[in-house]
Image (cartoon, coloured by chain):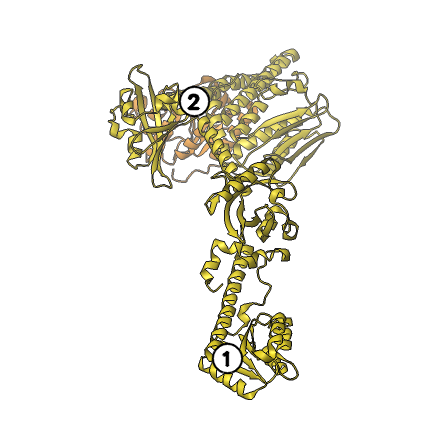
């Protein structure tokens, strides 16, 4: 049985705080694991580095920021899609960028969804809530993922 | 008379012929008053013998038949006259005394008959009996007589003589008729005068030339056709000519003589004169040709040559003409000037002499031997087209570049001349050299500029990317935490505190919008323009729908005209229309009956689209500031906004190669016009705008 963990890859603590609050407000009760950069996220997912020996841990959902220190979001996505274990892992690219190029690249690399973080908190909350409903409440991921 | 031959009649002496000179009263120079000789049978000579004595008749018939004549007979004058009228014999030999009509009466009858007037009659009479009658018969028109009894040889001699006379006269008449035809049909005027200068002959050409009928001219002095000032000289010349032994000569040599038409017009003629002596007096015949037309043609030719000469002398190109042996014949002014000669004498030399003055070389600097000089090549028959050479003056050292064209022109006489035209292209060559050098460096500079632009573009992209991420994140945080504070800690805040937090959120919202618009401006500037069929009407409808949804409380009358389609970038055109209609929406917000129209008019270079509103309008004085980013014509209290929207509109239109402008008045609405050209040239403008438009603004 897979864990009900949501992974948030976000280097900005304020965004992290606001996202966590939004998830809470959206009645998402899942445990949230936060990775501060791309390396940390990949280590967690593939049981490397700091997480060596703990084995691969597959979260329910990854909320992935694109602009990250060390290894950026697009590279993280590329590696998730390249590995057999995480190939079908739902990844929502979660960024404040409105750039078309980011959107196209994200979809090309296999992002399940692309959500631009709105500045308006209500929009942000709504987007988060919809994500929560779709991926967690309705639980529509592939059965054997 | 018997010595005259038709050949001699054609000579000059015929002019003096008594027959012809006697014609003058009849006018028009007609030579013959008799019937045409062609009517007469000429196969063999026919003789009609008329005699009432059968024996005499038979004897004469025999004699004449044996002599080879065709003989007709009649028994008296009456019958003789009838046979003669019918048969037209060459000669009538008639007895004098006959019953009914005698020989004398027959003579009279024949002389009165037009066809028989010239037929000779030989009367035969018994001398003792008829001597009176013979005299009477000769008076009546008989040509000769013979006394009976007569010797047959005498009869035959007389017959032969009379027939020969008839035949000679026929030939003469024929020749005269031919001459008359020639004179009449001649293109030249022919006038004959006597020693007193009275006109005896005036042909048809003379009538036309002098505008005077022959009837008017004949018998009058020639003076009327000679201009007064020449009359005396003319008379003395004619006299001198008359005294000379020369039979004909051309008048006034090669020079033309002046003549005077009956209407007073003077005109030039070419004339020749001939003289003959006839009947003891001198006759002069002048043959004249009107050379007015030829004179005019000569004059025109001279003028045309003069014009040509003027043109050649004023040509910017030099022109040199050479004899086949290399002797230079002619230089025009430009030719002398570009060679540094001050007068023609310096140029009129033999080609090899110029080798001491100039050195010619090819554009690559190879010195040309005299044989390879342009003029030498043309003299050898070569056709030169745009041969360029450097010409150096050996003494002073100046050097020019000349371009040569040349060919040989063959003249009528079989000789030929070499023509060489020369253009000084020194400046052009220098300019070409400069262009070549510039072109070499241009490519390098283009590469440098392109690299600079690419770098600038990268910077701009990085900048907008970082703005979109880095500037928006803190705003989102300010708003997010303010919201959290309001929601989670509402109990700890009084109303003033909540009010402040709402201001914080509003301010961050405004800044977010500003950033959003600046990013949009940057986005419409960057990136490839993808042209496709775009319905402006549809985009306008969608934009209006959005506006109505966001501001449901307003009543605005909006008319979007259907069917306006352009080729353009859908995304950019959408941004443009959202901005224009948003503007109109915003500035009509204070109107009771807001009206907005999107439509089109036909402009000079194609359709002009416009968005018109009846809102706040603007002062035309500031029309040029409308499209500058961050320029606002209204205070924020009146209308909120960032001042970036119209700059974005202009950028979009410019990228499509179009133009945008506005008309308006304060309080009376505004109209924004724009064009989206279809033409290919739009691409070029688009590119140039692309290059310049990527620089960040204000």
Splitting the image into 4 quarters, where does residue B401 fall? Answer: top left
Dot placed on the residue nearer the N-terminal end, 2 or 1: 1
Could you give the CA–CA distance between mark 2 and mark 1, rounded to whole angstroms? 148 Å
**How packed is label 1: few (under 14 Cα within 10 Å), some, or many (20 or more)?**
few
Does residue A88 show up? Answer: yes
Whether labels 2 and 1 share one chain: yes
Residue B377: image location, x then y, percent: 29, 33
**Chain A color in figure:** orange
Residue B282 in the image: above or below residue B653: below
Q: Nearer the viewer, residue B138 or B344?
A: B138
Mark 1 — residue? B150
- Give left or right: position of B213 versus B19: right
Q: Nearer the viewer, residue A106 or B626?
A: B626
Residue B446 in the image: above or below residue B216: above
Residue B271 in the image: above or below residue B510: below
Secondary element at tag 1: loop
Mark 2 — residue? B457
Chain letter, yellow in picture: B
Splitting the image into 4 quarters, where does residue B600 fall? Answer: top right
């Amino acid at each position: 049985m897979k864990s009900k963990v949501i992974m948030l890859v976000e280097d900005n603590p304020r965004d992290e705080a606001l996202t966590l609050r939004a998830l809470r407000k959206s009645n998402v009760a899942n445990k949230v694991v936060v990775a501060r950069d791309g390396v940390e996220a990949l280590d967690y997912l593939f049981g490397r580095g700091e997480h060596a020996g703990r084995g691969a841990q597959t979260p329910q959902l990854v909320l992935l920021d694109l602009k990250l220190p060390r290894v950026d979001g697009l590279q993280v996505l590329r590696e998730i899609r390249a590995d057999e274990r995480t190939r079908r892992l739902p990844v929502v690219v979660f960024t404040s960028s409105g750039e078309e190029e980011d959107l196209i690249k994200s979809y090309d690399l296999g992002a399940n969804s692309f959500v631009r973080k709105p500045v308006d908190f209500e929009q942000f909350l709504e987007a988060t809530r919809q994500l929560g409903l779709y991926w967690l409440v309705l639980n529509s991921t592939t059965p054997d993922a | 008379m018997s010595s005259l031959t038709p050949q001699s009649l054609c000579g000059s002496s015929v002019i003096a012929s008594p027959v012809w000179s006697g014609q003058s009263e009849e006018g028009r120079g007609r030579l013959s008053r008799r019937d045409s000789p062609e009517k007469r049978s000429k196969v063999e000579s026919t003789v009609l013998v008329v005699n009432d004595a059968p024996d005499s008749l038979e004897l004469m018939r025999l004699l004449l038949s044996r002599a080879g004549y065709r003989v007709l007979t009649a028994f008296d004058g009456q019958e003789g006259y009838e046979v003669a009228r019918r048969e037209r014999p060459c000669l009538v030999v008639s007895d004098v005394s006959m019953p009914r009509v005698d020989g004398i009466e027959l003579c009279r009858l024949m002389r009165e008959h037009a066809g028989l007037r010239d037929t000779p009659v030989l009367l035969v009479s018994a001398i003792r009996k008829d001597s009176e009658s013979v005299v009477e018969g000769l008076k009546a028109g008989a040509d000769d007589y013979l006394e009976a009894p007569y010797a047959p040889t005498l009869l035959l001699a007389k017959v032969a003589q009379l027939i020969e006379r008839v035949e000679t006269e026929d030939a003469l008449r024929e020749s005269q008729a031919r001459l008359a035809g020639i004179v009449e049909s001649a293109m030249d005027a022919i006038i004959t005068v006597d020693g007193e200068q009275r006109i005896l002959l005036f042909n048809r050409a003379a009538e036309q030339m002098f505008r005077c009928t022959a009837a008017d001219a004949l018998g009058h002095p020639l003076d009327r056709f000679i201009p007064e000032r020449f009359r005396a000289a003319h008379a003395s010349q004619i006299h001198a000519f008359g005294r000379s032994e020369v039979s004909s000569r051309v008048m006034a040599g090669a020079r033309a003589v002046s003549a005077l038409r009956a209407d007073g017009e003077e005109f030039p003629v070419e004339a020749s004169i001939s003289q003959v002596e006839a009947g003891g007096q001198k006759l002069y015949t002048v043959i004249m040709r009107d050379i007015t037309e030829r004179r005019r043609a000569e004059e025109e030719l001279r003028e045309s040559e003069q014009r040509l000469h003027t043109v050649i002398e004023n040509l910017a190109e030099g022109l040199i003409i050479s004899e086949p042996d290399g002797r230079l014949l002619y230089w025009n002014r430009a030719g002398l000037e570009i060679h540094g000669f001050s007068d023609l004498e310096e140029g009129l030399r033999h080609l090899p002499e110029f080798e001491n003055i100039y050195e010619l070389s090819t554009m690559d600097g190879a010195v040309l031997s005299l044989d390879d000089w342009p003029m030498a090549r043309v003299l050898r028959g070569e056709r030169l087209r745009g041969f360029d050479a450097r010409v150096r003056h050996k003494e002073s050292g100046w050097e020019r570049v000349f371009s040569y064209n040349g060919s040989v022109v063959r003249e009528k006489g079989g000789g030929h001349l070499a023509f060489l035209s020369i253009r000084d292209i020194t400046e052009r060559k220098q300019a070409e050299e400069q262009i070549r050098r510039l072109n070499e460096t241009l490519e390098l500079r283009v590469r440098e500029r392109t690299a600079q632009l690419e770098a600038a573009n990268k910077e701009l992209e990085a900048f907008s990317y970082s703005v979109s991420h880095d500037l928006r994140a803190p705003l989102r945080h300010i708003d997010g935490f303010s919201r959290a504070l309001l929601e989670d800690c509402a109990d700890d805040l009084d109303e003033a505190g909540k009010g402040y937090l709402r201001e914080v959120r509003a301010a961050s919202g405004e800044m977010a919008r500003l950033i959003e618009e600046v990013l949009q401006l940057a986005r419409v500037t960057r990136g490839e323009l993808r042209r496709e069929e775009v319905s402006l009407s549809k985009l306008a409808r969608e934009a209006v729908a959005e506006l109505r949804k966001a501001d449901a409380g307003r009543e605005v009358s909006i008319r979007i005209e259907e069917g306006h389609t352009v080729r353009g970038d859908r995304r950019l055109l959408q941004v443009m229309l959202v901005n224009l209609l948003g503007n109109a929406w915003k500035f009509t917000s204070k109107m009771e009956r807001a009206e907005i129209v999107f439509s089109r008019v036909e402009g000079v270079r194609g359709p002009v689209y416009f968005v018109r509103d009846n809102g706040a309008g603007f002062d035309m004085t500031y029309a040029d500031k409308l499209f500058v980013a961050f320029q606002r014509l209204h205070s924020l209290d009146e209308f909120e906004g960032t001042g970036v929207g119209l700059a974005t509109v202009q950028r979009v239109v410019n990228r499509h190669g179009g133009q945008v402008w506005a008309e308006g008045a304060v309080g009376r609405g505004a109209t924004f016009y724009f064009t989206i050209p279809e033409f290919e040239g739009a691409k070029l403008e688009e590119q140039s705008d692309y290059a310049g438009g990527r620089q960040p603004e204000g």
